[in-house]
Amino acid sequence: MEFIKKNWMGMGFCLIIAVAAYFLVTLLPIVGGPVFGILFGMIITLIIKARCGY
């Protein structure tokens, strides 16, 4: 239970990305859900790095 209390924001964020990827797969079934998840992760990482200055 301590793990969930500590990491609930990250797990929720991953859930949002997974749901978005699932709905995009219904629109474009040729491209798989993991591909969309990877692309979302790459885009989000670029945005966070640009805003935070990493």
Image (spheres, rainbow, N blue to C red):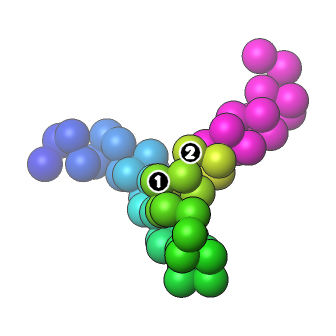
Which residue occupies 70% across, 44% down?
44
Which residue occupies 78% across, 27% down?
49
Q: Is residue 29 shown left or right of residue 14?
A: right
Kindly indicate whether the residue at mark 2 contacts the one at mark 1 (C-beta within 8 angstroms). Answer: yes
Residue 53 got which mark? none
Q: Amino acid at mark 2?
A: Ile
Q: Which quadrant, please, contains the C terminus?
A: top right
Q: Position of residue 31 (x, y in %)?
A: 57, 63
Q: Is residue 53 shown left or right of residue 36?
A: right
**Tag 1: Cα neighbours inside 10 Å, few (<14), some, or many (≥20)?**
few
Q: Position of residue 6 (x, y in %)?
A: 31, 40
Number of numbered discs overlaid on the protein picture: 2
Q: Considering depth in this image, is 43 or 48 the residue closer to the camera?
A: 43
Residue for badge 1? 34
Residue 46 figure quarter: top right
Q: Position of residue 36 (x, y in %)?
A: 58, 57
Which residue occupies 80% across, 39% down?
47
Q: Considering depth in this image, is 9 or 16 the residue closer to the camera?
A: 16
Residue for badge 2? 38
Stretch of the chain drawn in magenta: 41-54
Q: Position of residue 40 (x, y in %)?
A: 64, 51
Q: Does the magenta run of residues contain 53? A: yes
Provide the secondary structure element on which disc 2 rests: helix
Provide the secondary structure element on which disc 1 rests: helix
Q: Is residue 6 shown left or right of residue 17?
A: left
Q: Is residue 44 shown left or right of residue 13?
A: right
Q: Main secondary structure of the magenta part?
A: helix
Mark 1–mark 2 distance (CA, rounded to whole Å): 6 Å
